[in-house]
Every structure is written in structure tokens, then in C-alpha cells.
Amino acid sequence: MKLNLHSTDLSLSLKARVALEKHVFRFTHSLGQNFILDENVISDIVYKAGVQKGDNILEIGPGSGMMTAMMADKGAKVLAIELDRALEPVLNDVIGERDVKIVFQDALKADLNALTRGTFGENAPYSIVANLPYYITADFLMRAITLNPAPGSITLMVQKEAAERVMSQPGSKNWSALSASVRYFAEPEVVMEAPALLFTPPPHVDSCLLKLHMRKDRPLDEADEKRLMALIQAAFRMRRKTLANNLSASYSLSREETIHVLEKAGLGEKVRGEILTVDQLIDVMKAMQEKSE
Ligand code: SAM
């Protein structure tokens, strides 16, 4: 008997495995292709992401399309961005007629604002869900938190180390430009631990499902947010240097000007950028802005 891949009787996991086999798909390590082909795990991710009927979901790297199909089956409209064209026939088999739009582009280069607006409608709410290719984690996170309109939540499977970095607190060794930037835009939470063996093929490290609950009450306007992101990059540029040194170097300020800015922000001249809280970084950004006005 011939297997009908479009039959709804086949489990999604079996459909995905059969489609990968049929189209002779070869996993590419450099594209971060560690798939999750276990229906229970995918179901848990979709549940933790809070996907519901009527939701708009932007998915990065659909891979076999299992999670994509499951989110569509919940009644969500899914826009999936995949880099690897070799997955096209697999995705067609697994997703079938579901309400899914697949775009073959690099998620770091694609115009995500235009794509979400074009797919979901102008200013329509949406969320991001992805089992992310790990090599794009930091760059994608920075893109995702600054999207406009902002997603309601961002749920990402990431390497455990990346999750620890995002969850870290000011002054700890993991507190970085990424952690500070994320903390301004969102409240991060680890909602699931995912050992390497849950993936096909298994990566060398364990993972975590990270959920960013996006803040609706951000205190700065768009222009100041851009200034804050630039200041955060500058403050963390050279660890173990003082903030004064990093600011002088990045903004071509004299030592006196820098110390004046720090004084205005209530900080001493020896303070290091990497111990500052987000509120203190905002104070420095505002003091710099007043100086240039
Ligand atoms: N979502 C699938 C799953 O959970 O089984 C696959 C996840 S796999 C970790 C990452 C996926 O992202 C792969 O399908 C890979 O081809 C895709 N990918 C890699 N780099 C990408 C990029 N720059 N933009 C979009 N997709 C990318």
C-alpha cells in the first residue's frame, strides 16, 4: 500500500520523518539544523509559547515544518522564514493545505517588519516562536526585540549558555550588552529545559526554551531607544575598562566631558559599564543627550 503523506491519520512526527527520508534531506551543521521530531516536545513548546486560535505567529527556521503545522492546527496563522531551500519539498509535504506562509530568506536580512505587516495586517498583534539555529541567536534576539510593531512575546529554543546570558543580573560575569538590551524591552523567563538528546541530530550542548514577555510600558521614545542601544554597546565594548574610557573612545569625548556626564547620571568616574543596571544606563544616555543639546 502506498503511504499518503497528506493523510491526516499519520502523526506529524511520522509525516516529518517520512518526508525527510523521501526527499533525501541531509542535515547541515553550519545552518544549525538540529530538529525536534518528537510530537510531545513540540506540543509542549507550542503550549508554553501560549499559541491559541486566532494568533499570528512568526516562526524562524521551520525545518521539517512539524511545529509550524502544529501551530496552524491550533488555529494560528503562521509566517515561517526558512533559509534552506532544500527543505521546500519537505515543508510542502508536512504542512499541506494549512494556513501557513513560507518565505525562503535569511531571518537576519529579511525585512521582518514588512513581512509581518504584509501577512498579518498593519499593526496586527503577533508573537515569535522558534527553535532557533544557534549561530544566529544573539543577532536575531537583537533584531527581534527592536521590531516595530513589537511582538507580544518571543519564545525561543536557545543554547543553555545563551539563556543564562539573557537571564543574568547586573554585575555578574554573564551580564552583557545582550542581557541589558533584552531587559530593557522584556521580562525574560526560562520555561523549559531541553537536553541535547531531544534533538535530531543531537547538538553538543543542552538547550532551554526562553520566553520574553515584552514590556508594554517602555519609558523611552523610539529615538531615545536607539541611543540607549548604542550606549549599551559602547558601555560593554571593552570589559574591565572603566565606563569613562569606553564612552570617551566611542563618542570622541574629552575626559572632562565624560566625567561631567557620569556625574550628572550620579556615577563616579571609576565605574565600569558592565555593572550598571538598565535604569542607570538610561540615566547615562539622558545625561549624554542633555550634553549634546
Ligand atoms: N523548527 C525546526 C524544528 O524545531 O525541528 C528546525 C529547527 S533548526 C534548530 C533551525 C532551522 O533554521 C533550520 O531549518 C535551518 O535551516 C533554519 N535556518 C538556519 N539559518 C537560518 C537563517 N539565517 N534564517 C532562517 N532560517 C535559518
Image (cartoon, rainbow, N blue to C red):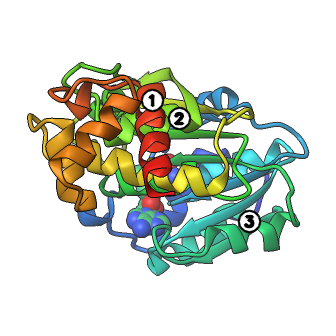
Whichever of labels 1 and 2 marks the residue nearer the N terminus, that label is 2
Residue appearing at x 69%, y 59% in the figure? 148
For this view, does 185 lie left or right of residue 149?
left
The answer to whether mark 1 is within 8 Å of ligand 1 is: no
Asked if residue 29 is positioned above or below residue 284 in the image, the reply reads below
Whichever of labels 3 and 2 marks the residue nearer the N terminus, that label is 3
Mark 3 or 1, which is nearer the eye? 1
Q: Nearer the viewer, residue 261 or 273?
A: 261
Secondary element under disc 1, as helix, strand or loop, is helix
Q: Residues within 10 Å of mark 2 (few under 14, many from 20)?
A: many
Hey, which residue is sitting farthest left in the picture? 240
Is residue 124 visible in this depiction of the protein? yes
Q: Nearer the viewer, residue 223 or 201?
A: 223
Is residue 15 visible in this depiction of the protein? no
**Horizontal and vertical percent position of residue 60:** 55, 58
Residue appearing at x 63%, y 76% in the figure? 103
Q: Nearer the viewer, residue 65 or 112?
A: 112
Mark 1 or 2, which is nearer the eye? 1
**Horizontal and vertical percent position of residue 292:** 45, 57
Residue appearing at x 50%, y 67% in the figure? 107
Q: Amino acid at mark 1?
A: Val
Whichever of labels 3 and 1 marks the residue nearer the N terminus, that label is 3
Mark 3 or 2, which is nearer the eye? 2
Circle count: 3
For this view, does 145 lie left or right of residue 207?
right
Q: Amino acid at mark 3?
A: Thr
Q: Residues within 10 Å of mark 3 (few under 14, many from 20)?
A: many
Which residue carries the number 1 mark? 278
Q: Would you identify the image quadrant in which residue 253 lies?
A: bottom left
Q: Quadrant of ligand 1?
A: bottom left
